[in-house]
Image (tube, rainbow, N blue to C red):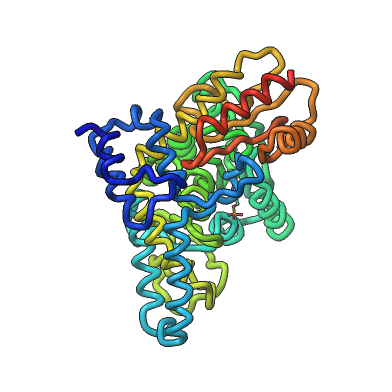
Amino acid sequence: MDKRTFIKNAGLLSIGGAFGLGSLPELMNSVSAVPSSFLAKDEDFWAKIRGGYLLKPDYINLENGYYCFLPQETLENFIRHVREVNYQGSYYMRTVQVENKKKAAARLAEIGGCSADEIIITRNTTESLDMIIGGLHWKQEDEAIMAEQDYGAMLEMFKLTAKRYGIVNKVVSVPNLPQNDDEIVNLYAGAITEKTKLIMVCHMINITGQILPVRKICDIAHSRGVQVMVDGAHTFGHFKFSIPDLNCDYYGSSLHKWLSVPLGAGILYVKKENIGKVWPLLASGDIREDDIARLNHIGTHPAHTDLAIFNAIDYYNMIGAERKEARLRYLQNYWTDKVRNLPHIILNTPADPARSCGIANVGIKEMKPKDLADVLYKKYRIYTVPIDGANVHGCRITPNVYTSTDDLDILVKALTELG
Ligand SMILES: Cc1ncc(COP(=O)(O)O)c(C=O)c1O
Protein backbone atom coordinates (compact mmCIF):
# COMPACT_ATOMS: atom_id res chain seq x y z
CA MET A 1 0.00 0.00 0.00
CA ASP A 2 1.54 3.35 -0.89
CA LYS A 3 1.60 6.27 1.49
CA ARG A 4 -1.31 8.14 -0.06
CA THR A 5 -3.62 5.13 -0.09
CA PHE A 6 -2.75 4.46 3.50
CA ILE A 7 -3.66 7.96 4.57
CA LYS A 8 -6.93 7.81 2.65
CA ASN A 9 -7.80 4.44 4.11
CA ALA A 10 -7.01 5.66 7.57
CA GLY A 11 -9.69 8.27 7.07
CA LEU A 12 -7.34 11.16 7.63
CA LEU A 13 -8.40 13.10 4.58
CA SER A 14 -11.58 14.30 6.20
CA ILE A 15 -13.09 17.49 4.83
CA GLY A 16 -12.21 20.21 7.25
CA GLY A 17 -8.76 18.76 7.53
CA ALA A 18 -8.13 18.61 11.25
CA PHE A 19 -6.95 15.24 12.41
CA GLY A 20 -8.30 14.20 15.75
CA LEU A 21 -5.94 13.97 18.70
CA GLY A 22 -4.14 10.68 18.55
CA SER A 23 -4.08 10.31 14.77
CA LEU A 24 -0.80 12.16 14.30
CA PRO A 25 1.20 9.01 15.15
CA GLU A 26 -0.70 7.13 12.45
CA LEU A 27 -0.01 9.86 9.93
CA MET A 28 3.67 9.82 10.84
CA ASN A 29 3.80 6.02 10.67
CA SER A 30 2.47 6.21 7.16
CA VAL A 31 5.45 8.29 6.05
CA SER A 32 8.16 6.68 8.15
CA ALA A 33 9.97 5.35 5.07
CA VAL A 34 9.71 8.59 3.09
CA PRO A 35 12.99 10.56 3.01
CA SER A 36 12.72 14.02 4.62
CA SER A 37 13.80 15.80 1.45
CA PHE A 38 10.98 14.11 -0.47
CA LEU A 39 8.37 14.60 2.24
CA ALA A 40 9.28 18.29 2.43
CA LYS A 41 7.61 18.78 -0.97
CA ASP A 42 4.49 16.73 -0.23
CA GLU A 43 1.71 19.31 0.10
CA ASP A 44 -0.89 16.61 0.88
CA PHE A 45 1.10 15.51 3.90
CA TRP A 46 1.73 19.03 5.19
CA ALA A 47 -1.94 19.87 4.71
CA LYS A 48 -2.64 17.24 7.37
CA ILE A 49 -0.17 18.95 9.70
CA ARG A 50 -1.86 22.27 8.90
CA GLY A 51 -5.16 20.66 9.83
CA GLY A 52 -3.86 20.33 13.37
CA TYR A 53 -3.67 24.11 13.73
CA LEU A 54 -6.45 26.60 14.24
CA LEU A 55 -5.58 29.35 11.78
CA LYS A 56 -7.13 32.81 11.70
CA PRO A 57 -8.81 33.21 8.34
CA ASP A 58 -8.18 36.99 8.28
CA TYR A 59 -4.59 36.81 7.02
CA ILE A 60 -1.72 34.54 6.07
CA ASN A 61 0.59 34.53 9.06
CA LEU A 62 4.18 34.79 7.84
CA GLU A 63 5.35 36.20 11.16
CA ASN A 64 5.98 33.08 13.20
CA GLY A 65 9.34 34.44 14.30
CA TYR A 66 7.93 36.19 17.34
CA TYR A 67 5.84 33.28 18.58
CA CYS A 68 5.16 29.92 16.95
CA PHE A 69 1.70 29.48 18.44
CA LEU A 70 0.65 25.98 19.44
CA PRO A 71 -0.90 23.26 17.35
CA GLN A 72 -4.28 22.26 18.83
CA GLU A 73 -2.85 19.06 20.24
CA THR A 74 -0.30 20.88 22.42
CA LEU A 75 -2.84 23.58 23.27
CA GLU A 76 -5.37 21.03 24.54
CA ASN A 77 -2.70 19.34 26.63
CA PHE A 78 -1.61 22.70 27.99
CA ILE A 79 -5.17 23.54 29.01
CA ARG A 80 -5.40 20.14 30.68
CA HIS A 81 -2.25 20.95 32.68
CA VAL A 82 -3.66 24.33 33.71
CA ARG A 83 -6.76 22.54 35.03
CA GLU A 84 -4.75 19.83 36.75
CA VAL A 85 -2.34 22.18 38.51
CA ASN A 86 -5.30 24.33 39.53
CA TYR A 87 -7.09 21.23 40.82
CA GLN A 88 -4.13 20.06 42.87
CA GLY A 89 -3.11 23.55 43.99
CA SER A 90 -0.36 23.74 46.59
CA TYR A 91 -0.19 19.97 46.73
CA TYR A 92 1.16 19.92 43.17
CA MET A 93 3.53 22.78 43.88
CA ARG A 94 4.91 21.15 47.03
CA THR A 95 5.20 17.59 45.76
CA VAL A 96 6.18 17.12 42.12
CA GLN A 97 6.59 20.63 40.69
CA VAL A 98 10.39 20.78 41.00
CA GLU A 99 10.88 17.19 39.92
CA ASN A 100 8.72 17.70 36.83
CA LYS A 101 10.60 20.82 35.84
CA LYS A 102 13.86 18.87 36.09
CA LYS A 103 12.43 16.08 33.97
CA ALA A 104 11.32 18.59 31.35
CA ALA A 105 14.83 20.08 31.35
CA ALA A 106 16.25 16.58 30.83
CA ARG A 107 14.01 16.11 27.76
CA LEU A 108 15.22 19.45 26.42
CA ALA A 109 18.82 18.38 27.01
CA GLU A 110 18.16 15.42 24.69
CA ILE A 111 17.15 17.79 21.89
CA GLY A 112 20.16 20.03 22.58
CA GLY A 113 22.48 17.03 22.75
CA CYS A 114 23.86 18.19 26.08
CA SER A 115 23.97 16.83 29.57
CA ALA A 116 20.89 17.37 31.74
CA ASP A 117 22.99 19.07 34.40
CA GLU A 118 24.02 21.82 31.98
CA ILE A 119 20.56 23.09 31.09
CA ILE A 120 17.78 24.92 32.93
CA ILE A 121 14.33 26.11 31.98
CA THR A 122 14.03 29.88 32.09
CA ARG A 123 11.24 32.19 30.98
CA ASN A 124 12.85 33.17 27.68
CA THR A 125 16.10 34.00 25.87
CA THR A 126 16.15 37.45 27.43
CA GLU A 127 16.26 36.01 30.93
CA SER A 128 18.84 33.38 29.92
CA LEU A 129 21.29 35.67 28.18
CA ASP A 130 20.83 38.74 30.34
CA MET A 131 21.58 36.58 33.37
CA ILE A 132 24.97 35.77 31.82
CA ILE A 133 25.69 39.33 30.70
CA GLY A 134 24.76 40.76 34.08
CA GLY A 135 26.16 37.83 36.06
CA LEU A 136 29.75 37.58 34.84
CA HIS A 137 32.44 38.97 37.12
CA TRP A 138 33.30 42.02 35.05
CA LYS A 139 36.19 44.37 35.78
CA GLN A 140 36.38 47.94 34.57
CA GLU A 141 37.62 48.17 30.95
CA ASP A 142 36.87 44.52 30.22
CA GLU A 143 35.59 44.26 26.66
CA ALA A 144 32.63 42.49 25.11
CA ILE A 145 32.01 41.95 21.40
CA MET A 146 28.58 41.85 19.80
CA ALA A 147 26.91 42.74 16.49
CA GLU A 148 24.51 45.52 15.62
CA GLN A 149 22.25 42.79 14.18
CA ASP A 150 21.92 41.20 17.64
CA TYR A 151 18.65 41.42 19.52
CA GLY A 152 17.86 44.74 21.22
CA ALA A 153 17.27 43.35 24.73
CA MET A 154 20.77 41.89 24.92
CA LEU A 155 22.41 44.97 23.41
CA GLU A 156 20.61 47.05 26.05
CA MET A 157 21.81 44.70 28.79
CA PHE A 158 25.41 45.19 27.63
CA LYS A 159 24.85 48.97 27.74
CA LEU A 160 23.49 48.68 31.27
CA THR A 161 26.45 46.52 32.27
CA ALA A 162 28.80 49.14 30.79
CA LYS A 163 27.15 51.77 33.01
CA ARG A 164 27.44 49.57 36.05
CA TYR A 165 30.95 48.13 35.66
CA GLY A 166 32.62 50.37 33.10
CA ILE A 167 33.04 47.62 30.50
CA VAL A 168 33.61 48.51 26.85
CA ASN A 169 31.20 47.17 24.21
CA LYS A 170 32.57 46.68 20.72
CA VAL A 171 29.89 46.38 18.07
CA VAL A 172 30.63 44.75 14.70
CA SER A 173 28.27 44.63 11.72
CA VAL A 174 27.56 41.29 10.05
CA PRO A 175 27.15 41.46 6.23
CA ASN A 176 23.80 40.17 5.00
CA LEU A 177 25.32 38.10 2.22
CA PRO A 178 28.79 36.92 3.25
CA GLN A 179 30.99 35.12 0.73
CA ASN A 180 32.28 32.54 3.18
CA ASP A 181 32.73 31.70 6.88
CA ASP A 182 36.07 33.48 7.10
CA GLU A 183 34.42 36.80 6.36
CA ILE A 184 32.30 36.42 9.50
CA VAL A 185 34.90 34.73 11.70
CA ASN A 186 37.49 37.42 10.91
CA LEU A 187 34.99 40.11 11.80
CA TYR A 188 34.66 38.78 15.35
CA ALA A 189 38.30 37.67 15.66
CA GLY A 190 39.47 41.09 14.49
CA ALA A 191 37.65 42.77 17.36
CA ILE A 192 39.31 40.61 20.06
CA THR A 193 41.93 42.34 22.22
CA GLU A 194 43.71 41.34 25.41
CA LYS A 195 40.84 42.85 27.35
CA THR A 196 38.07 40.87 25.65
CA LYS A 197 36.13 38.68 28.06
CA LEU A 198 33.00 37.70 26.14
CA ILE A 199 31.66 37.48 22.60
CA MET A 200 27.93 37.37 22.04
CA VAL A 201 26.99 35.84 18.72
CA CYS A 202 23.66 34.92 17.19
CA HIS A 203 23.28 31.36 16.00
CA MET A 204 20.64 32.71 13.64
CA ILE A 205 20.22 36.46 13.17
CA ASN A 206 16.56 37.12 13.85
CA ILE A 207 16.02 39.93 11.34
CA THR A 208 17.48 38.07 8.34
CA GLY A 209 17.54 34.39 9.28
CA GLN A 210 21.26 34.17 8.56
CA ILE A 211 23.00 31.25 10.36
CA LEU A 212 26.47 32.17 11.59
CA PRO A 213 29.54 29.88 11.77
CA VAL A 214 29.34 29.67 15.55
CA ARG A 215 31.72 26.74 16.02
CA LYS A 216 34.52 28.53 14.18
CA ILE A 217 33.94 31.72 16.16
CA CYS A 218 34.01 29.76 19.44
CA ASP A 219 37.21 27.95 18.50
CA ILE A 220 39.07 31.12 17.65
CA ALA A 221 37.68 32.93 20.69
CA HIS A 222 38.79 30.14 23.02
CA SER A 223 42.25 30.10 21.48
CA ARG A 224 42.47 33.74 22.60
CA GLY A 225 41.02 33.08 26.08
CA VAL A 226 37.60 34.58 25.32
CA GLN A 227 34.24 33.06 26.25
CA VAL A 228 31.31 32.88 23.84
CA MET A 229 27.62 33.27 24.60
CA VAL A 230 25.29 32.20 21.80
CA ASP A 231 21.87 33.70 21.16
CA GLY A 232 19.89 30.76 19.85
CA ALA A 233 16.44 32.31 20.20
CA HIS A 234 15.59 31.16 16.67
CA THR A 235 17.25 27.80 16.43
CA PHE A 236 15.97 25.37 19.07
CA GLY A 237 13.32 23.27 17.35
CA HIS A 238 14.00 25.00 14.02
CA PHE A 239 16.94 23.00 12.70
CA LYS A 240 19.01 20.16 14.04
CA PHE A 241 22.24 20.82 15.93
CA SER A 242 23.99 19.87 19.13
CA ILE A 243 24.91 22.60 21.58
CA PRO A 244 28.18 20.94 22.70
CA ASP A 245 29.23 20.64 19.03
CA LEU A 246 29.16 24.43 18.86
CA ASN A 247 31.79 24.50 21.63
CA CYS A 248 30.19 27.57 23.20
CA ASP A 249 30.18 28.53 26.86
CA TYR A 250 26.58 29.69 27.19
CA TYR A 251 23.52 29.17 24.99
CA GLY A 252 20.06 30.67 25.35
CA SER A 253 16.84 30.01 23.46
CA SER A 254 13.11 30.68 23.67
CA LEU A 255 10.91 27.60 23.58
CA HIS A 256 7.79 29.57 22.60
CA LYS A 257 9.44 30.19 19.27
CA TRP A 258 10.31 27.12 17.21
CA LEU A 259 9.43 24.40 19.71
CA SER A 260 5.87 25.79 20.06
CA VAL A 261 5.79 25.67 23.83
CA PRO A 262 3.24 28.05 25.43
CA LEU A 263 4.45 31.62 25.93
CA GLY A 264 7.06 32.18 28.60
CA ALA A 265 9.54 29.32 28.41
CA GLY A 266 13.20 29.27 27.45
CA ILE A 267 16.44 27.45 28.10
CA LEU A 268 19.86 28.37 29.34
CA TYR A 269 22.79 26.05 28.69
CA VAL A 270 25.94 26.64 30.69
CA LYS A 271 28.98 24.48 30.06
CA LYS A 272 29.66 22.61 33.29
CA GLU A 273 32.98 24.33 34.00
CA ASN A 274 31.32 27.78 33.75
CA ILE A 275 28.43 27.26 36.15
CA GLY A 276 30.36 28.65 39.11
CA LYS A 277 31.51 31.69 37.09
CA VAL A 278 28.07 33.31 36.91
CA TRP A 279 26.25 35.30 39.59
CA PRO A 280 22.65 34.07 39.71
CA LEU A 281 19.97 36.52 38.63
CA LEU A 282 18.17 35.90 41.93
CA ALA A 283 19.69 34.44 45.06
CA SER A 284 19.15 30.72 45.22
CA GLY A 285 20.51 29.79 48.64
CA ASP A 286 23.19 27.33 49.52
CA ILE A 287 23.52 25.40 46.29
CA ARG A 288 26.87 23.94 45.18
CA GLU A 289 28.93 26.14 42.82
CA ASP A 290 28.83 23.55 40.06
CA ASP A 291 25.09 22.86 40.30
CA ILE A 292 23.16 24.69 37.57
CA ALA A 293 20.15 24.87 39.91
CA ARG A 294 21.87 27.88 41.51
CA LEU A 295 21.00 29.86 38.36
CA ASN A 296 17.39 28.75 38.30
CA HIS A 297 15.60 30.33 41.22
CA ILE A 298 12.78 32.60 40.00
CA GLY A 299 10.15 32.02 42.66
CA THR A 300 6.66 30.78 41.92
CA HIS A 301 5.98 30.61 38.21
CA PRO A 302 3.42 29.03 35.82
CA ALA A 303 4.24 25.37 36.51
CA HIS A 304 1.72 24.19 33.91
CA THR A 305 3.96 25.65 31.20
CA ASP A 306 6.75 23.30 32.33
CA LEU A 307 4.35 20.40 31.81
CA ALA A 308 3.39 21.53 28.32
CA ILE A 309 7.08 21.28 27.37
CA PHE A 310 6.69 17.47 27.37
CA ASN A 311 3.80 17.72 24.92
CA ALA A 312 5.58 20.19 22.67
CA ILE A 313 8.60 17.88 22.56
CA ASP A 314 6.38 14.89 21.80
CA TYR A 315 4.79 16.81 18.95
CA TYR A 316 8.19 17.93 17.64
CA ASN A 317 9.64 14.42 17.87
CA MET A 318 6.60 12.96 16.22
CA ILE A 319 7.04 15.22 13.20
CA GLY A 320 10.79 14.66 13.46
CA ALA A 321 13.56 17.22 13.65
CA GLU A 322 14.90 16.39 10.20
CA ARG A 323 11.49 16.48 8.56
CA LYS A 324 10.66 19.81 10.14
CA GLU A 325 13.99 21.33 9.14
CA ALA A 326 13.66 20.02 5.60
CA ARG A 327 10.14 21.44 5.27
CA LEU A 328 11.11 24.86 6.65
CA ARG A 329 14.11 25.01 4.36
CA TYR A 330 11.97 23.93 1.41
CA LEU A 331 9.38 26.62 2.14
CA GLN A 332 12.00 29.35 2.34
CA ASN A 333 13.65 28.24 -0.89
CA TYR A 334 10.26 27.86 -2.54
CA TRP A 335 9.56 31.58 -2.44
CA THR A 336 13.09 33.04 -2.39
CA ASP A 337 14.10 31.07 -5.52
CA LYS A 338 11.16 32.62 -7.37
CA VAL A 339 11.98 36.23 -6.49
CA ARG A 340 15.73 36.38 -5.76
CA ASN A 341 16.70 37.45 -9.27
CA LEU A 342 13.90 39.92 -9.92
CA PRO A 343 15.51 43.34 -10.53
CA HIS A 344 13.46 45.19 -7.93
CA ILE A 345 13.96 42.63 -5.15
CA ILE A 346 16.60 42.73 -2.43
CA LEU A 347 17.06 39.43 -0.63
CA ASN A 348 18.78 40.02 2.70
CA THR A 349 19.33 36.31 3.42
CA PRO A 350 22.04 34.08 1.95
CA ALA A 351 20.96 31.33 -0.46
CA ASP A 352 23.63 28.94 0.87
CA PRO A 353 21.79 26.18 2.83
CA ALA A 354 24.51 26.29 5.49
CA ARG A 355 23.63 29.93 6.14
CA SER A 356 19.84 29.88 6.25
CA CYS A 357 16.81 27.73 7.01
CA GLY A 358 13.15 28.78 7.34
CA ILE A 359 13.49 32.55 7.81
CA ALA A 360 14.36 35.06 5.11
CA ASN A 361 14.12 38.81 4.71
CA VAL A 362 13.04 40.57 1.55
CA GLY A 363 13.03 44.22 0.56
CA ILE A 364 11.84 46.11 -2.49
CA LYS A 365 14.11 48.75 -3.97
CA GLU A 366 12.99 52.25 -3.05
CA MET A 367 10.17 51.03 -0.83
CA LYS A 368 10.29 51.49 2.92
CA PRO A 369 9.95 48.19 4.83
CA LYS A 370 6.95 49.59 6.69
CA ASP A 371 5.22 50.43 3.40
CA LEU A 372 5.97 46.95 2.12
CA ALA A 373 4.50 45.39 5.27
CA ASP A 374 1.44 47.64 4.93
CA VAL A 375 0.74 46.74 1.33
CA LEU A 376 1.36 43.04 1.98
CA TYR A 377 -1.18 43.17 4.76
CA LYS A 378 -3.80 45.45 3.23
CA LYS A 379 -3.72 44.27 -0.38
CA TYR A 380 -2.57 40.65 -0.11
CA ARG A 381 -3.65 39.73 3.45
CA ILE A 382 -0.14 38.65 4.40
CA TYR A 383 1.07 39.42 7.90
CA THR A 384 4.84 40.05 8.26
CA VAL A 385 7.12 42.31 10.27
CA PRO A 386 9.08 45.21 8.75
CA ILE A 387 12.76 45.55 9.71
CA ASP A 388 14.45 48.88 9.07
CA GLY A 389 17.81 49.12 10.79
CA ALA A 390 21.20 47.49 11.37
CA ASN A 391 21.76 47.48 7.60
CA VAL A 392 18.66 45.36 7.03
CA HIS A 393 15.74 46.89 5.16
CA GLY A 394 12.89 44.58 4.32
CA CYS A 395 10.17 42.37 5.74
CA ARG A 396 11.03 39.24 7.67
CA ILE A 397 9.16 36.25 6.28
CA THR A 398 8.76 33.44 8.77
CA PRO A 399 6.66 30.44 7.73
CA ASN A 400 5.95 27.51 10.02
CA VAL A 401 5.10 23.85 9.46
CA TYR A 402 1.48 24.74 8.73
CA THR A 403 2.41 27.16 5.94
CA SER A 404 1.37 25.95 2.48
CA THR A 405 2.95 26.67 -0.87
CA ASP A 406 -0.41 28.24 -1.80
CA ASP A 407 0.24 30.81 0.94
CA LEU A 408 3.70 31.43 -0.47
CA ASP A 409 2.40 31.72 -4.03
CA ILE A 410 0.43 34.76 -2.85
CA LEU A 411 3.62 36.21 -1.37
CA VAL A 412 5.49 35.60 -4.62
CA LYS A 413 2.65 37.20 -6.61
CA ALA A 414 2.74 40.23 -4.31
CA LEU A 415 6.51 40.64 -4.50
CA THR A 416 6.42 40.27 -8.28
CA GLU A 417 3.62 42.79 -8.75
CA LEU A 418 5.16 45.34 -6.41
CA GLY A 419 8.10 45.91 -8.76
C1 LIG B 1 17.76 36.79 18.30
C2 LIG B 1 16.82 37.00 19.45
N1 LIG B 1 17.30 37.01 20.69
C3 LIG B 1 16.50 37.16 21.75
C4 LIG B 1 15.15 37.32 21.61
C5 LIG B 1 14.31 37.51 22.83
O1 LIG B 1 13.42 36.47 22.97
P1 LIG B 1 12.38 36.51 24.20
O2 LIG B 1 11.56 37.74 24.04
O3 LIG B 1 11.62 35.26 24.05
O4 LIG B 1 13.21 36.58 25.42
C6 LIG B 1 14.59 37.33 20.35
C7 LIG B 1 13.14 37.51 20.15
O5 LIG B 1 12.62 37.59 19.09
C8 LIG B 1 15.44 37.15 19.23
O6 LIG B 1 14.95 37.15 17.99
The location of residue 217, given as percent across then percent down, is 49, 35
Quarter occupied by residue 62: top right
- The residue shown at (27%, 32%) is 34
Quadrant assignment for the N terminus? top left
- The residue shown at (46%, 76%) is 83
Residue 248 visible:
no
Quarter occupied by residue 39: top left
Q: Residue furthest bottom?
A: 91
Q: Residue furthest left?
A: 1
* Residue 372 vs residue 167, the one in the foreground: 372
Q: Residue furthest front?
A: 15
On screen, 413 above or below 91?
above
The location of residue 353, given as percent across then percent down, is 46, 25
Residue 402 visible:
yes
Is residue 150 toward the left or the right of residue 15 in the image? Answer: right
Is residue 169 toward the left or the right of residue 107 in the image? Answer: right
Quarter occupied by residue 98: bottom left
The location of residue 22, given as percent across then percent down, is 32, 56
The location of residue 174, given as percent across then percent down, is 62, 30
- The residue shown at (54%, 58%) is 128
* Residue 197 vs residue 132, the one in the foreground: 132
- The residue shown at (65%, 14%) is 342
* Residue 367 vs residue 198, the one in the foreground: 367
Quadrant assignment for the C terminus? top right
On screen, 50 above or below 131?
above
Q: How many marks?
A: 0
